[in-house]
Image: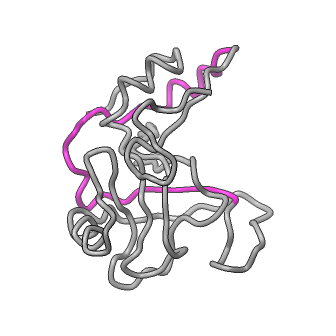
Amino acid sequence: MYIHPDYQAGQLHSNIAVIRIVSSFPSYIYNQTALRCSEDEVNFERLTVAGWGYIRDQTGQLSTRLRQTELPYAGNTCKRYYQSIGQYIDETMFCAGDLDHGGTGICVGDLGGAAVKRVGSLNVITGVASHFNECGGPKLISLFTRVSSLNYWIRNNTGISFNCYY
């Protein structure tokens, strides 16, 4: 396992780790997956996230089946809100979810999962579930590590030459 060298426990910056696998991915997975390489904001895109995390905050029960939901990219409004409570959202992160109403998001057990944008038959990995303050709550919505800001590091440490999507 490789932990990003800029990551510090308890901080949000560069919150990512990868594993290097011994065998190769089946071609049907590799050919349908790409890393988001564009640094452009993904405003108004809907991202699919999946995991076995808590179904509701504070229940203490993980889901028994893989669940998924769609979250809208939240843009700079989220950054300003997190900064107002003392958490800095930098270029290695982005927010997704309904900032005003909440309702769905990542939770305990979902961290490390991908935020994916479907483009035709291609699954574009845009982010990695990184942090939440309240599962699916308003204002404190889901934070993701931005793959485009770290794709060079991901490629070098996995040994996989993922397709790039711009």
The answer to whether 29 is drawn above or below residue 134 in the figure is above
Residue occupying image coordinates x 38% and y 39%: 147
The residue lying at 25 percent from left, 74 percent from top is 84
**Figure check: 74 above or below 18:** below
Q: Nearer the viewer, residue 110 or 81?
A: 81
Q: Quadrant of residue 108?
A: bottom right
Magenta residue span: 23-52
**Residue at image coords 73%, 79%:** 59
| Residue 52, horizontal then vertical, whole percent | 70, 59
Residue 138 shown left or right of residue 134 in the figure: left
The picture quadrant where one finds residue 2 is: top right
Q: Is 50 a magenta residue?
A: yes
84 with respect to 140 (left or right):
left
For the residue pair 86 and 64, the one nearer the viewer reads as: 86
Residue at horizontal 78 percent and vertical 72 percent from the top: 61
Task: Point out the residue furthest to the bottom here.
Answer: 101
Q: Please, which colouring scheme is shown?
A: one colour
Image quarter (top left, top right, bottom left or bottom right) of the C terminus: top left
Q: Is residue 37 left or right of residue 1?
A: left
User: Could you say where residue 7 lies in the image, as x and y percent from the top left?
Assistant: 44, 40
Q: Which of 18 and 74 lies nearest the eye of the viewer? A: 18
Location of residue 94 (image quadrant): bottom left
What x and y, as percent, mark residue 110?
A: 61, 57
Q: Position of residue 74 (x, y in %)?
A: 30, 65
Q: Nearer the viewer, residue 48 or 59?
A: 59
Is 29 magenta? The answer is yes
Quadrant occupied by the N terminus: top right
